[in-house]
Amino acid sequence: MPNYRIYLLDQDDRIFQAGTLIAVTDDEARRRARILPETASAIEVWQGTRCVGRTVSDPTRGAGIGTVSRGRRMWNESGDGEGYV
């Protein structure tokens, strides 16, 4: 199974915590990482040098919903949890 790195980012887009996640697919890794800790402004999921996904917390719309930042793709957190926006 592939290893993924999970990076929790603060509001200045700096990593303040990192961890490892083992998942079968990219979709599974994104699903498992989608729950944002209240202290994280965003979470990025990486496999090696490839960014698998990024979710951004938007306090006006709820955790996990936001806009793409710095040209990276963000996966859909609108309820179905699938696909990119």
Image (cartoon, rainbow, N blue to C red):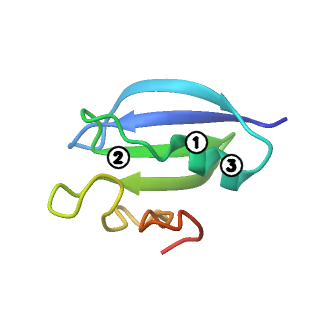
Residue 30, placed above or below residue 81: above
Q: Which element carries disc 2, helix, strand or loop?
A: strand
Residue 77 is left or right of residue 41, and the answer is: right
Q: Nearer the viewer, residue 9 or 26?
A: 26
Which residue, as the protein is rendered here, is positioned at the far left? 60
Residue occupying image coordinates x 30% and y 64%: 66
Bin the neighbour count of mark 1 within 10 Å (Cα to Cα): few under 14, some 14-19, many 20 and up: few
Residue 57 is left or right of residue 53, and the answer is: left
Q: What's the mark number on residue 42?
A: 2
* Residue under label 3: 28
Q: What's the mark number on residue 32?
A: 1
Q: Quadrant of the N terminus?
A: top right
Image location of residue 52, percent across then percent down: 61, 53
Residue occupying image coordinates x 29% and y 52%: 63
Distance between the Cα atoms at labels 1 and 2?
Answer: 14 Å
Residue 7, placed above or below residue 64: above
Q: Which residue type does callout 2 highlight?
A: Ala
Image location of residue 5, percent across then percent down: 60, 33
Bin the neighbour count of mark 2 within 10 Å (Cα to Cα): few under 14, some 14-19, many 20 and up: many
Q: Nearer the viewer, residue 23 or 13?
A: 23
Mark 3 / mark 2, whichever is N-terminal = 3
Residue 20, placed above or below residue 74: above
Q: Which residue type does callout 1 highlight?
A: Arg
Q: Which residue type does callout 3 highlight?
A: Glu
